[in-house]
Amino acid sequence: MNSAIRSSGILLQPELPICQTDLPLDWYQEEFKPYAEEYLALPDRKPGTVLPWLDRYALPALDHFGDSLLLLAHFYMGGEIVKLVERYGGKVADSYALALQAARHPEKKVIVESAVHFMAETIATLARADQSVWITNPKAGCTMEMLAKDWMVQPVADQLLERYGDQLAVIAYMNTGGRLKALAGRTGGAVCTSSNAHLVMDWVRSRGKKVLFVPDQHLGRNTAVRLGIARERIAALPDPQTWRASLRVSSADWDALDRAEVILWGSYCGVHTIFKPAMVHWWKQRGWKVLVHPESPLEVVEAADGSGSTDYLWKAVMNATAGERIVIGTEGHFVRNAREQARQRGVEIMHLADIPDPAFQGGGCGCATMSRNDPPHLAGMLDLLRRGCPPEINRVLAGDVVDETTAVRERLSDAERQSLIREARLALERMIDITERARP
């Protein structure tokens, strides 16, 4: 399989600021504060200023580690990290491609990821024993995953498994911790991403299984409808924010769950749930093409001209021809990066929520937790690794659970971690096999 990630096409522009936001100094770990102080003291955020400063730390690290170092970032990162990671030879991609990088590149021994914790943990799950995975900020989490921690999902899954036994299989979206990926593995299910969810769900159903889809109810519902499953055969569990005090299926819920082919955990992405069908109609009435991410509500996906993963959306932008006008419904930093690149080729890009009409409230939302990774975190991580004194909290092992507020980490014993890796890797390898077999 070809595991290479092609260049995103993102270019640094000399006069274009490469940062969207600055974090306050007290947001940084003690080890990272010296780098943050230097960065915050820079007169501006233009490449001519930021790059010489970052080169002081990045280039010695690149020389020190050579080809054994791999830098990774997700498309949802702010423009500063996306552009800087590629500048230093790193890769920018969606969660599926990122997950494969350690396993497919055994020569890379030190992997530094600028994204959220579940992505780094997935890389670590598939990594070899001689590869280490580091995240630039351990507090970088995911609101959807925060509403689907294993201690929340497991009691409900236990109830469902007690009732349905081997008839039930868990599909764990990539936006879950390793403990839930392991649950998918041992129930005969698999991991999925937004790009292959339909393939994975179709595979599970072809084996005669009822599906528990965790955690995103919108991706799960959109996928089920895409596969032709009747809407009355799709059941959603309650919103975890209001339900987690009890985390028990009530007797009144069993009739709907028994009839369901797909049961949805009630979590969601705060970025994508702001989108409404009226926003789609507003743009389409003015001649714009609307593309959205499938974490958006079903009504939004059905109203749009197309939906797909971040890779799908990015390719739509990069392959557009001069004169095209495209509206994108997804994370705000992604759309900002897309707009910068498209403008150079005469393509107009707008964010779905950026409607100049007082009837519509709220603008394009960025993933705030993803953006906790910034240039000082990248500089500090690379420099501390080179000096041989990286903070242990930044090391990511399979099964780790980190509190996104306090950075307190719960780590499994070696035996527990090896058991988890076997089960989670099985779920990931099923996803990879299903996806690669479907390629033309």
Image (cartoon, rainbow, N blue to C red):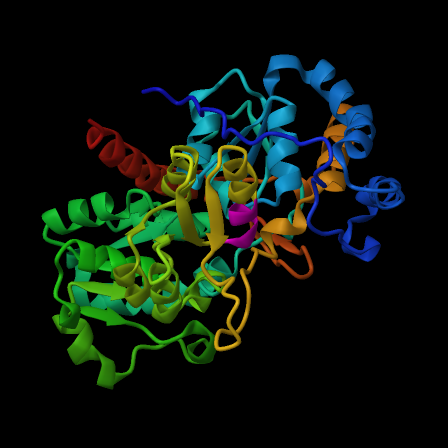
| Front residue of 382 and 401 | 382
User: Which of these two is toward me, 227 or 264?
Assistant: 227
Classify the position of the C terminus by image quarter: top left
The residue lying toward the viewer, choosing from 228 and 132, is 228
Q: How many marks?
A: 0
Residue 202, percent across and down? 16, 48
In the rendered image of this protein, does residue 46 appear above or below residue 214? above
Q: Position of residue 173 (x, y in %)?
A: 36, 51
* Front-most of residues 84 and 212: 84
Q: Residue 306 magenta-drawn?
A: no
Residue 337 horizontal/vertical position (percent): 56, 42
Q: Residue at x 73, y 15 (%)?
A: 64
Q: Residue at x 57, y 43 (%)?
A: 115
Which segment is the magenta one? 331-336
Residue 348 appears left or right of 37? left
As drawn, 316 above or below 172: above
